[in-house]
Amino acid sequence: MSTLHSYRKRGRGFTLIETIIVVAVTALVSVTLGSLLVYFYKTNAYALEQAQAVGQARRGVEDAMRYLREASYGSDGSYPIKSVATSTVTFYANVDNDPAIERITYSLKGGTFYRAVTKSTGNPPAYTGTTATSTIATLVVNATSTPVFRYYNNAGVELATPVNTAQVASIKTTITVDANVNRAPVSFTLSGGATLRNLRDQL
């Protein structure tokens, strides 16, 4: 009799208290894992966004430096460097390997780095046609103390504002990007320099 009683005692299911404990532990584990997954996703999503922004900015700086090196007289006879400022530069160069020379403007506006290209048209040539604007980099956070463009003479001395375009021999470009200024990792700064090859012997 006692053996049968012991068997029934051992074979019974969970008590109400045991069930509540199991459910509570399971819920706690699920919530914890969910929170960890959300945190992991958010952290990696930001890191990916930052990496994409840095890659885009790097290509943008390389793009600007490539064409600045090849700055030349415009199809209408304009001097290679049309205008300069800390956040914008306009010059002439051949971007598509055809006989005509294009007018190019790189500028930073509202955290976005743009390139605008205007082809020469007519005879005599003039830059009155449609301007094609493309985005070169986004999430740019340059501080006021970090100009996008800095200009140097043939001796490597930085030119003071207002810059005399006839003295510009090289240009340095600096872009700082940050997908979220309130979170790590910290912002990333890219720089590049270009010597104006076609003007080197004229300055």
Image (cartoon, grey):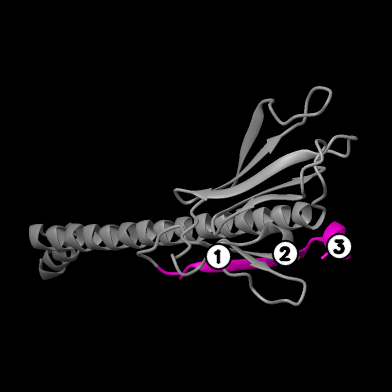
Mark on residue 161? 1
Q: Which mark is residue 202?
A: 3
User: Where's the C terminus, which quadrant?
Assistant: bottom right
Category of crowding for the residue at label 2, using alpha-carbon neighbours closer than 10 angstroms: few (below 14), some (14–19), many (at least 20): some
User: Which residue is drawn at the image coordinates 36% and 61% (left, top)?
Assistant: 39
* Badge 3: residue crowd in 10 Å (few <14, some 14–19, many ≥20): few
Q: Which mark is residue 167?
A: 2
Seen from the viewer's position, the closer of residues 92 and 16 is: 92
Q: Give the number of the disc on residue 33.
A: none
Q: What residue is drawn where x is 65% and y is 61%?
A: 164
Q: Is residue 83 magenta?
A: no
Please give left or right for residue 1 compared with residue 7 in the image.
left
Number of other residues with Cα within 10 Å of mark 1, as a class: few under 14, some 14 to 19, many 20 or more: few
Local SS, label 1: loop
User: Where 59 falls versus 151 (above or below)?
Assistant: above
The answer to whether 32 is drawn above or below residue 130 in the figure is below
- Locate residue 36, reporting x and y percent: 35, 63
- Is residue 195 or residue 33 the one in the foreground? 195
The residues tagged by marks 3 and 1 sit, at their Cα atoms, a distance apart of 22 Å
Secondary structure under tag 3 reads loop
CA–CA distance in space, label 1 to label 2: 12 Å
Residue 37 in picture, x, y percent from top left: 38, 58
> Which type of secondary structure does the marked residue at label 2 adopt?
helix
**Contact (Cβ within 8 Å) of mark 1 with mark 2:** no
Read off the magenta span.
184-203
Asked if residue 168 shows in the view, the reply is no
Q: Nearer the viewer, residue 133 or 35?
A: 133
Location of the N terminus by quadrant is bottom left
For this orientation, the residue located farthest to the top is 122
Tell me which label, 3 or 1, sits earlier in the chain.
Answer: 1
